[in-house]
Structures are given as C-alpha cells and as structure tokens.
Image: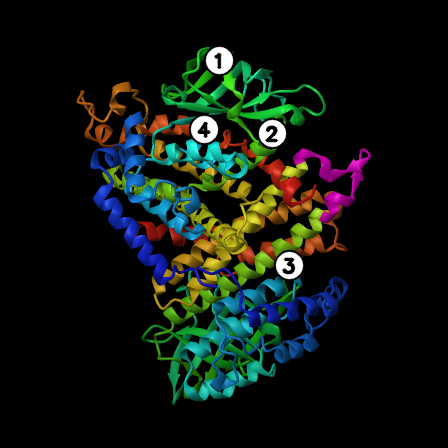
Amino acid sequence: MDLNFTAEEQSFRDEVRGFLRAKLPGEISRKVLGGKRLEKNDFVRWQRILHAQGWGAAAWPQAFGGTGWNAVQQHIFDEECADAGAPLQLPFGLKMVAPVIMAFGNPAQQQYFLPRIVDGTDWWCQGYSEPGSGSDLASLKTRAVREGDHYVVNGQKTWNTLGQYADWIFCLVRTSTEGRQQEGISFLLIDMKTPGIEVRPIIMLDGEHEINEVWFEDVKVPVQNLIGEENKGWTYAKFLLGHERTGIAGVGRSKRELKKLKDIAAKETAHGRPLIEDQRFRDRIAQVELELMALEITNLRVISAEGEKKRAPGPEASILKIKGSEIQQMLTELKMQALGHYALPYIEDALDADWTGDPLMEAYADHAAPLAGQYFNFRKTTIYGGSNEIQKNIISQMILGL
Amino acid sequence: MDFNYTEEQLALQDTLRRFIAKDYAFEHRRALAKSADGFDREAWKTFADFGILALPFHEDFGGMNGNAVDTMLVMEMLGRGLALEPYVSTVVLCGGLIRDAGSAAQKEALLPAIAAGELMLALAHYESGGRYAVDHVATTAKPAGSGWTLDGAKAVVLGAPSADTLIVSARDGKGLSLFLVDAKAPGLTLRAYPTQDGARAADVKLSGVEVGAAALIGSAGAALPLVERALDYANAALCAEAVGIMSALNEVTLEYLKTRKQFGVPIGKFQALQHRMADMVIATEQARSMATLAAVRVDSADAAERSRAVAAAKAYVTQSARLVGQQAVQLHGGMGVVDELNVAHYFKRLTMIGLSFGDADYHLGRFSDTLLAA
C-alpha cells in the first residue's frame, strides 16, 4: 500500500510538465483557465502540437500511433494537461470511435481513419441519441437501407456535440426491425460532407451553440463504412460507452477548478474580508474538496486494477462517472455563488478572449463573466454519457446482480 | 502507487476473517455485549496469539513493527465482526502514546505486557463542557514530593472499566502532561456504563490521586501534540473499522434485497431500492479510499499533513457511514429496527464511531480551517 508515485512516474510527470510549459500556447491556456470561448482551431492546433510530440493519443496502443502509456501515466498526463490549462482533447474521435475501429474495424478502416484522428485531420462527432431515444438508446429509429454498395440513411440524431465543426459522424442506425431491438442496429461511419445531411444548432441554456440536431435525408453511405457486421452494432455501441465513462471522472480538471474556486473565494470580499474567511462558505468548499480527495483515490484504485489485469474498465467506471459529474456540478455552483451580485449579468461578448467592452467591475472581467454560464452548462454532466440514473442501474445490475 | 496488501498482510487478514466467522459469530457477540466484562477475554488472548496486540510496536519490545496500514487491515476485520474488545483504547491510543513518547523503562514495562494480552489501558482525556476540543482539560497535576497529585473529572473514557492502567491528561504549571495511573489507585473512582453499541466506558473522577515521578509520559507540559497525534491514530483506525462495517452491512443488505419478496418479486427488483443500494456501494468505495488515505498519511512525520488527511477522512467516512447505516436499516424495513438482527448493531456501532474522537462537523471544521492557511 503506497499512495506515492514512483520515481519513474514522478520523472514522467516532470517531462509532461516541461513539455506543457514549452509547447502549450499561452493564448489557448488563458482561454481555458479564464473560462473563455474556445474555437475549433484551438482544439485542432493543440491536437497537432501533441501529435508532433508523439503524444496525440495517450490511451492508444503504439501499433496504432498511440503512446502505449500505462493507465497511471495517462492519468498523470491528464492531470498535468488540466492543470496547465490545455484544452480537453475531445473524446469523440480519440476515445469513442477510435477504440471501436481498433477492436472491430477492418484493416482498411484502421489504416485510413486512425492516423487522421491522431494528427488532427478529422474532427469526429457522435450520432447516438435521437429525439425518441435517450436513455433507451436501443429504441433508435434512424434507418439505413442497403441498396447495392450503399446504405441509404434517413432519420434524425440529436444532442450532437460540436457537429458544426465535424468532418465525420459515427452513427447507430437501424438495419433490421426483426427480433429484439438491440439486434437490428448497425454502426456506420458517415462523411459529414455527404449530400442530404443537415446540421441544425440547438442553443443551450447558457446561450452557447455546443450541440446540434443532425438530419439525414437519403444520405448515401458506402458499405465499406460499416463497422464489423451488420446488425451487430449494439455490441460495438456498448463497448464504446464503456470507454466513454473512463475519462469522465475528470479528476484533473476538477482539481484545477477547485483551485480556481479557492482563488475566487480569496478575491471576493464580504465586510471587507475575503469570502474564504466566511466559515459557512469555507465549509462548503471543504466539503467538495473531501469528495474530490475521495474520488481521486477511488480513480487511482480503478486505474491500478486495470493496469494489473490489463482489462478495460468495468461497471466500476459508473462510480467514477457519478461522483465525477456531481463534483463538477458542485464546483460550478460554488464558483457562481461566490460572485454574489455579479453572478447575474449576462454579457455574451465577455466570453470572447479578445473582449474589450466595458468591464463593469474589475472582478467581472477577471473571473466572473463565465461562471454562471458554466453552472448552467454543467447540468449536462449528470445527463450525458448515460445519465447518472442509468449508471446506478448499471451498478445495481452489473456489480450487485439485482 | 500500489493499492495491494503484501502476502503477510493478506495472511493476517485471512486469519482474522476466519476467526470472526467461526469464533465471533453474531449470537456470541450479542451475549458478550450483555456479559459483565462486555467483551471476550478469550478472544483477547487469541488476539495476542495472532500478534495483533503487538502490531504497532517495535520488535525490541515484543512488537511486530507494523504500520498504520496494518492497523487499517486489522480494524476493518474487527469492524466486520463488531468486535467489542478495547483494541483502539489499549493498542492504538495508549500503546501508541507509550511507543511514541514513553521512556525506555515505560516501554519495557508496558509494551510487552500489552503485546502478550496481559495489560489493558484506557486514555482518560476528554472532559465535559469541551465537546471535542483537544486542549480542553481542567484536570490538574500539582507537584507533590517527587511526583504529582491529580484532581479532576474525565468524561466517557472508552475501555476504562476493563483497564488496568489509565493514561490521564492533566495541566501542570507548564501545560498539558500525561500520567500513567493505576486503575486501583486511591482517589480514583469509576462510574462505569455500557455504551449504545455494547462496549464499555466510564466517567472517571480523580480526587487527590498521587502518582510518582515515573508516571509521567514524555516531558512535563509537552503532551498536547502527543494527544493530537494519538487521536489521529485512533481516528484513522475508526475510519477503517467503519469501512469494514459498511462492507459487511452492504453484503447483508444486498442479500436481503435478493431474498425478501413483496408483490411477488424480490424487492431488489424495484428501482427505488436498487438506486439506494447503489448509493450505499458508492459511499462505501469512496469511504474506503479516504480510510486508505488516512492510514497512509497518519504515519507521516509532518503533523499538518497527518492531521489534514485524518480530519478529511474522519469527516467523510462519518458522513458515508451515516448514509450506509441509515439506508441499510430502511431497506430492511421492520427487520432493520429489531435487536435480533445484526443490521441494527452495525448501524449503532457506525453511529457511535461517528461521535467518538470528534464528529463529522468537528473534523470538517478542522479540515476547512486548513484552507485559511493555504
């Protein structure tokens, strides 16, 4: 039993830290740390920088262009990237479709798609949820009908994150209506430039355009873009969701945001004293920190077990998802609350990195502008990736056998 | 980063697990709680044979050179068995104090006797009116000849009724000091009682109790940091005990959900109950993480690091234990509130752990105040 990192792990951390200091552009990290809007190019640029270092895909095996790092190294890398203010590497290509292509794709698909994900050429988005299929994902209705060497796809996907930038979408489509609903689903890769695809923005409660509906009308998809076998897509879909949950604990990012919360509580004042000296508020910060300390160790316990058994994370990933998302929400709520009156103003342009408008108060320009919006936006975390209620179903059924 | 136990630790865990299952079954434990001693003197001898009474002491004094992770493992198993023996009082608190601050003569006289199961101790420190404040001590130690005279009153001294010797904190002119006091010393009286969880404690009165020069542990007036450290050890141990209880409670609750039928199906088929059970499992895993943190950090030489980790763990584990205990009772329905089932006894012990050596609010406050220094 030893909670300390080994000397090798420590020197790996130093190496990552040194790289971030040298190569993470300040104009990007300032946006991340300041809660400003990120543009497509910020994500792509950072992915290219990582790729140039050979670190484009921390979790991939070396054979596919990944780092081959073990679970502890990946954890250290995530933690340092978060702390330095690197943009989150979006999961849709790297952590969702890529593991599916590696496990179930054919060599031609692997050779074409994987290098383009790791070097930042292709931006991927997700086509799982539909208006009538949320938690009950297997009830999905988007149809793909085989016609010669093409499928013709008709239907509608929703809750599609950042699809407005995407080059490709991976889709669950119905190829059969016979048998159980899980048995008629296939996994298709679709070029977003194909005629018949329309992306319609959904504006979220914080006023931002982060998600979309994607409509398909007679969209022709070559059969070589089918993953694995027709009607076996549900198996691949579940495999993907298992991977989606692993990074979702978000320990590194929550540690950074806790630091920020403390920083704000030291700057905001009441009765001329820093807010952190108010015991009621300080105890609430302390309570979140306890949750995060526990989650950090639980996360490391899961990671260590994975490393030893060389297996993908199992249902215990649901625990990480539930606690991770709850903590992220607690942090956004407290950051907002710390602002008092200045949680109220909504100045849309203030989220732009180059905003030069009337700063209201100095504190608003410095840290307040994005925080209420973040609180509203982060209500999504207990809903996406399999809602927390679905995660509790998974724990009850897969771990506890109820 | 290594979350594994060593081969030796696993062997000890296995030994204790088998002992609890075979020789410390629930009905036996129930009878013990109602017996005169309130615990099993035979089990105490067995503990000596297993080496767990010698665990945290140096081999020079008959010890096993164990660390706080070893203690965690033992406490988790004692928790599963709801063991009533005053292990924390004798070995962790008092044994730890003598190990860390005792003179060579005190160590030689006391530690081998503890290890052999021949000596039991209790720490008489807290006093009424001070809640959990460690420095709230009004008991006095006045120099008398080469020794001292002690006067005062101590509140809810856990394990006192069975203790051969008490370690008493008292103020002399310089500050807080600790004294070894024979439980039969003239002027020392015990008002003994059982506790809610079936253990034994006493209010202790000291009226002109005389002790000699050899009774002083460490330097006169320098005991506060010693007591703080001993209480951190005790709290780390209680965190592990709570985790053992929560694991056992989850097992019996899960079994009940799978076997108890209502509306023609096992009640575990109902989602409202499934989600509560999931919450209990999550709380227990998180508590296990914090108990591990406490065990690893409590041995730290850095007092601030040690206290911060233990305060965090005790606050968090207590909160988790409250959830698990209350929900285990709720999920058992009427069976959760009867004396004949182990569920209620696990619940009561968890609750009392949360109120011993500082409650959740006290430890959260302790942790919270470290944010000011940062």
Residues at circles 4 and 3 in contact by the CB criterion of under 8 Å: no
Of circles 4 and 3, the one toward us is: 4
**Residue furthest right as drawn:** B264
- Is B26 rendered above or below residue A48? below
Q: At 26% across and 47% down in the image, what residue appears?
A: A19
What residue is pinned by disc 2? A229
Q: Which mark is residue A379?
A: 4
Q: Which mark is residue A311?
A: none
Of circles 2 and 3, the one toward us is: 2
What residue is pinned by disc 1? A215
Q: Which residues are magenta?
A: B255-272
Nearest the camera: A328 or B41? A328
Chain name for mark 3: B
Q: CA distance from mark 4 to mark 3?
A: 42 Å
Give whichever of discs 1 and 4 has the lower sequence position. 1
The image position of residue A376, as x and y in percent, is 40, 26
